[in-house]
Image (spheres, rainbow, N blue to C red):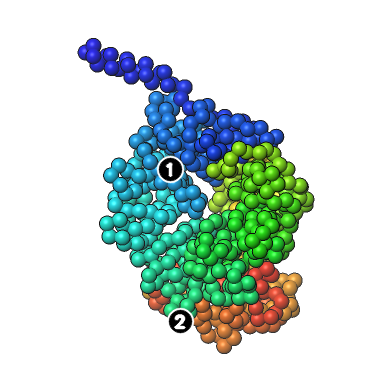
């Protein structure tokens, strides 16, 4: 008994000696970085440098999440205030706290590219990460409810995972291979721990959630799968021969052909994209207006900047840089690092809407890391040729508050400090990140004199901005009001007019990116100004059985635009196959390249009553989306900047 009591007392005394453990201090931090001695430091706005951690322990990696957490991987396990040792920790700059994750973790798999964040989370605050278990292989682990000691091994097998993506409901998509057989695959792991294949004999180069709530992946296979694929809504088996971006039309039926996308661009510049048909990327960003822009390519083929979303994909080829090395975003705009003809290191500000370019540096600095903050400052580090020094500096970019896609002013580069060596990373710290509102919904004819817009609470927000437009281009929207709650009544809406609505969150100083959009209107559906398309008399989303009849009707009230000459379009997406209704009222297949699509009618806008364009029974199970649109000018070409469009989705069960 005395021996047991002695051991317990010894354990209590030992843990009390280490009760203080590691602590953090982010006060005043604008950016943090790992120096050449693997010490995690912070820099304030005046250039003062100090350590983040209370003890100068070695740090291997850091990752700052959208939720405002800084995940830290130590070089060796460190003692925390709870008396346990941890390799992985989560620090919260908001309240200067740090907590360990997984007492048994001895090695972690870290993706330094950022394409698959090494620590991911779902909507229930569960954390997921990859670890190297004793004996080899790779383990996928879950830290339940963010509790650092409540660890679940989801997969602990003879596998290797190259890229993975956690969905909000806890579903995990993962691309890798089985070590014993070298079989390559893309698989789905459900929250109930059921595993199912989505593709086989395939290399997964990236997986991303796009603003249309779909997952896109870069896939390369030996005999099939080549390009960028938009996964089915249900995250089911992928059709290898219908990529979102691809080529070889004699074998595949891509929505957008690589050869068409690169047409008219410098062949040497687009090599990074055309190699692998866009499947291989090294960096991606999402602008505040929801554009997905990537840096595509591999070292041997150079790199190409490409806008993957919204469709159609297009090459971004600046004139001031022809060898890009790094991209970042600030508000709606793009920051590009690179050289011109191999010389003259540059940093430019690029507008993806207008293609306007602004040079931000007038001195030679080889930039290694780039990060932008909500206060409008862009921070960077790199090798300054004048003096052969590693420097950290910043540039202030002021965006017009009423016109978020335009620049009000650009400041001069301010050199903040000189470092003794090249930093391993440079990460901007946002103490209270303002996330875009989610779940935005606008009422559809529920009220005769207003449109009610609702959304979910955004973390750290004190208020919300509501924006509206008659088309789907976020940058063209106007702010129509503010709200301190999660509801806004648009009493200025014209009855019968179909509007797109967005929300932005704010804390009084900072403003989030755009939310996703939703359409809404007030008054009778028959009074909607603009195109309306219905399935079995219903709007938006309709579910039917596979033996039921389906009737698609279109109608339009042009309102004040009656008599304007426009192109009229009716398009259908059946699974991954595209069709347009031609001027002989025949449904015609096409490859998704909008330049190969033709209008159903060209002429003046007039009041068209409900007109049936499809009547069919026995559709196969799956998802079908039908679009009715008119665009200006009338030139037999889809103009996505001046378009009136409505859509209905039919899910056949």
Q: Is residue 104 visible?
A: yes
Question: Residue 253 at what x, y percent from top left?
Answer: 47, 76
Kindly tell me whether residue 527 is visible in this rendering: no
Above or below, 292 relative to 97: below
Q: Write the residue at 50% across / 57% down.
A: 209
Residue at the image point whose x is 76% and y is 50% from the top:
410
| Mark 1 closeness class: few <14, some 14–19, many ≥20 residues within 10 Å | many
* Residue 251 percent across, percent down from the top left: 43, 79
| Quadrant of the rendered image containing residue 374 | top right
Residue furthest to the bottom: 584
Q: Which residue is mark 2?
A: 250
Q: Nearer the viewer, residue 52 or 622?
A: 52
- The kind of secondary structure element at disc 1 is strand
* Residue occupying the far front of the picture: 387
Q: Residue lying farthest right?
A: 409
Residue hosting label 1: 127
The residue sitting at 31% across, 60% down in the picture is 182
Callout 2 secondary element? loop
Q: Earlier in the sequence, mark 1 or mark 2?
A: 1
Image position, residue 298 (x, y; %): 51, 62
Residue lying furthest left: 1
Q: As drawn, is 359 to the left or to the right of 51?
A: right
Q: Are marks 1 and 2 in contact (CB under 8 Å)?
A: no
């Amino acid at each position: 008994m005395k021996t047991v009591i002695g051991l317990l007392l010894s354990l209590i005394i030992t843990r009390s000696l280490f009760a203080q453990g590691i602590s953090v201090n982010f006060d005043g931090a604008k950016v943090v970085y790992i120096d050449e001695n693997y010490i995690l430091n912070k820099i304030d706005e005046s250039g003062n440098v100090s350590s983040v951690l209370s003890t100068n322990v070695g740090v291997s990696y850091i990752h700052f999440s959208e939720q405002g957490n800084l995940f830290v991987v130590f070089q060796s396990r460190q003692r925390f205030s709870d008396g346990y040792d941890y390799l992985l920790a989560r620090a919260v700059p908001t309240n200067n706290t740090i907590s360990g994750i997984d007492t048994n973790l001895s090695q972690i798999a870290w993706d330094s590219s950022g394409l698959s964040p090494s620590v991911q989370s779902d909507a229930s605050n569960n954390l997921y990460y990859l670890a190297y278990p004793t004996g080899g292989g790779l383990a996928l682990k879950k830290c339940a409810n963010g509790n650092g000691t409540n660890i679940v091994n989801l997969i602990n097998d003879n596998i290797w995972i190259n890229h993975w993506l956690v969905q909000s409901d806890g579903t995990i998509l993962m691309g890798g291979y089985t070590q014993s057989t070298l079989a390559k695959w893309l698989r789905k792991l459900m929250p109930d721990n059921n595993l199912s294949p989505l593709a086989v004999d395939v290399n997964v180069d990236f997986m991303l959630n796009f603003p249309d709530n779909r997952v896109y992946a870069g896939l390369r296979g030996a005999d099939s799968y080549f390009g960028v694929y938009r996964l089915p809504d249900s995250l089911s088996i992928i059709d290898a021969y219908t990529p979102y971006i691809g080529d070889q039309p004699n074998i595949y039926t891509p929505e957008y052909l690589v050869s068409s996308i690169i047409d008219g661009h410098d062949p040497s510049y687009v090599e990074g994209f055309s190699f692998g048909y866009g499947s291989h990327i090294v960096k991606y960003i999402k602008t505040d207006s929801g554009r997905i822009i990537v840096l595509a390519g591999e070292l041997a083929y150079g790199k190409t900047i490409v806008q993957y979303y919204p469709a159609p994909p297009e090459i971004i080829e600046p004139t001031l840089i022809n060898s890009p090395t790094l991209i970042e975003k600030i508000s709606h705009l793009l920051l590009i690092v690179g050289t011109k003809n191999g010389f003259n290191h540059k940093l430019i500000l690029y507008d993806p809407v207008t293609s306007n370019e602004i040079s931000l540096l007038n001195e030679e600095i080889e930039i290694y890391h780039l990060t932008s903050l909500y206060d409008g400052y862009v921070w960077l580090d790199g090798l300054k040729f004048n003096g052969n020094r590693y420097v950290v500096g910043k540039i202030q970019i002021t965006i017009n508050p009423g016109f978020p896609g335009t620049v009000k002013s650009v400041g001069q580069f301010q050199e903040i400090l000189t470092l003794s060596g090249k930093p391993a990373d440079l990460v901007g710290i946002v103490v209270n990140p303002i996330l875009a509102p989610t779940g935005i919904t606008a009422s559809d004819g529920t009220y005769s004199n207003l449109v009610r817009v609702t959304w979910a609470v955004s973390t750290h927000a004190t208020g919300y901005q509501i924006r509206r437009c008659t088309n789907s281009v976020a940058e063209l929207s106007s702010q129509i009001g503010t709200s301190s709650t999660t509801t806004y009544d648009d009493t200025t809406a014209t009855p019968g007019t179909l509007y797109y609505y967005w929300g932005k969150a704010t804390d009084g100083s900072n403003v989030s990116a755009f939310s996703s959009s939703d359409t809404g209107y007030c008054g009778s559906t028959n009074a909607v100004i603009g195109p309306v398309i219905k399935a079995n008399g219903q709007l938006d989303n309709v579910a039917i059985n596979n033996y039921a009849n389906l009737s698609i009707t279109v109608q339009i009230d042009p309102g004040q635009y009656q008599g304007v000459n426009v192109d009229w379009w009716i398009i259908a997406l059946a699974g991954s196959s595209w069709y347009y209704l031609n001027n002989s009222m025949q449904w015609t297949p096409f490859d998704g390249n909008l330049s190969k699509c033709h209008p159903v009618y060209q002429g003046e806008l007039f009041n068209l009553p409900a007109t049936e364009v499809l009547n069919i029974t026995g559709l196969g199970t799956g998802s079908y989306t039908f679009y009715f649109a008119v665009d200006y000018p009338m030139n037999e070409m889809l103009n996505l900047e001046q378009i009136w469009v409505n859509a209905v989705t039919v899910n056949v069960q």
